[in-house]
Image: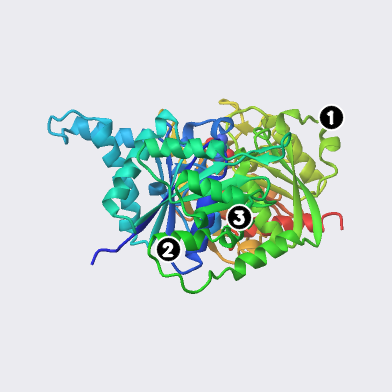
Amino acid sequence: MPHNTKYVFVTGGVASSLGKGIISASLGKLLQSRGFSVTIQKLDPYINVDPGTLNPYEHGECYVTEDGAETDLDLGHYERFLNLPTSQMNNVTTGKIYQTVISKERHGDYLGKTVQVIPHITDEIKRRIKLLGTKHKLDVVITEIGGTVGDIESLPYIEAVRQLRWELGPTNSAFIHLTLVPYLSASGELKTKPTQHSVKVLLENGIQPDVLVLRTEKPLNDDIRRKVALFCNVDSSAVVESIDVKTIYEVPLLMHKEKLDETIMKKLNLPVQEPPKLDDWNEFINKLKNPKSKVKVGLVGKYVELHDAYKSIVESFIHAGAVNECHVELEMIQSESITASNVKEKLDHLQGILVAPGFGHRGVEGKIEAIRYARENQVPFFGICLGMQCAVVEFARNVLGLQEANSTEMVRNTPYPVIDLMEEQKGITDMGGTMRLGSYPCQVKKGTKAYMAYHKLETHERHRHRYEFNNQFLPQFEAAGMVAAGINPETNLVEIMEISSHPWFVGVQFHPEYKSTVINPHPLFVEFVKATMNFGG
Ligand code: GLN
């Protein structure tokens, strides 16, 4: 018998950035904790094939999956909530859809037919939605549609979902629409009209939503719920309040209180038996809300004006802070603003410094100054990807005395290329999807800070880079006290560099932040936070 996968669709209306990703992840978490196998998928209406080539200022962080797909940052939320890896199948863009359809057309697969948005583009969208459920025999696939209902570019997705719902039959799919109910302080009222209009747009496109989730800053009273239900044609029980909360991690509990999980399960004809098992989650929230100590950590990067640019790092600190029962306050520091003369003033109130990933030379010298400060003043330091590469350059210049040391990404003909382009990157001209991406093994050396964190000799971490530590210099570095604490056992690429004599100075070529989840906080973040708690104490 074929596995009967159920599909839930999530759209947004009225305004963007209402948190569809968090609502999808929260529902996924609740269904998972009731024993169902679930995954979450994001359909993005833009034409880029993936967000890998997008500037973080445009679209926030680019998230990377185990299998090396560069994806939307919502996949990070899905993994952090469900504690399950996603894959390239979990993020579909209009660019990907068209790429597939056009290459099939060139291949002659359409047998001379005119290739059109309907049915060819919509068929490809439907295929990608269904594939995820059938391939892994999942109970539920939640598909979040990016953008706002009414946008021209999301129309083919809405039409594909309309068709798919019809094909699946009434008990095999549910449709959630998330909208905003604004509060007008002048009249002291919550306004439902934008929601009504947004639902009308969906109806014009042939979709009657089953559940409305209303983002609001004030509680919804019964009148409002009844009004929305009546004018938008849904049961009163299907009007769900999503009030602003302090942390996104409270949203699953809030959605459970509002019975979102139960309403969806009933619609899908899934048995509602035991309540969800959320003990781990509740314990995490409890620790998060009742920290016993507090530290201030500087996040030195060049995209600091946009919080979403370092989303996974910010979330990793929340997970690692909670296990340590410590509130980690992150101070975003623009690396371009740091110079040798102001570095002390900018950093001396911090218990830890993290230097962020990045590309290109903007802000690199400021990062190097920050690292020098951390190294010389024994301040716990964590360098990620470019942050690790800058730590290597700093050490080469100021400890090994190689004054003009650099990465060849910054100065192509530096006399001391301590960070150099990877061999397999030479000759690559396409920018999209061509970095060293995804999960690779890392052998951890016993007796190092990294080993203290992992407690094992081999781990796997995700990557996104073109440059690497130049192994020609390794003996010089190790003799002076900066050691390779982790290497790739197959290629010998350096994965972790640390300074043995420093209380906690660790740089990693990979991105630990992509693997930190609520249930499994990343061990390096956990140890780094521990080190910051001990700093100066
Ligand atoms: N720009 C560096 C490289 O390509 C670092 C990349 C990163 O920080 N993700 O190797």
Classify residue 166 as left or right of residue 285: left
The Cα–Cα distance between marks 2 and 3, rounded to whole angstroms, is 21 Å
Point out the frontmost of discs 3 and 1.
3
Q: Quadrant of residue 521?
A: bottom right
Residue type beneath disc 1 = Ser
Question: Does residue 484 appear in this view?
Answer: no
Q: Quadrant of residue 518?
A: bottom right
Identify the secondary structure beneath mark 2.
helix
Placement of 314 over or under 407, stated as above or below: below
| Residue 527 in picture, x, y percent from top left | 69, 59
Q: Quadrant of ligand 1?
A: top right
Mark 3, Cα crowd under 10 Å, few <14 / some 14-19 / many 20+, is: many
| Residue 127 in picture, x, y percent from top left | 29, 46
Mark carried by residue 266? 2
Tell me what residue is drawn at x 41 percent, y 34 percent: 154
Identify the secondary structure beneath mark 3.
helix
Tell me what residue is drawn at x 67 percent, y 58 percent: 320
Q: Foreground: 387 or 110?
A: 110
Q: Which residue is mark 1?
A: 341
Residue type beneath disc 3 = Val
Q: Foreground: 415 or 214?
A: 214
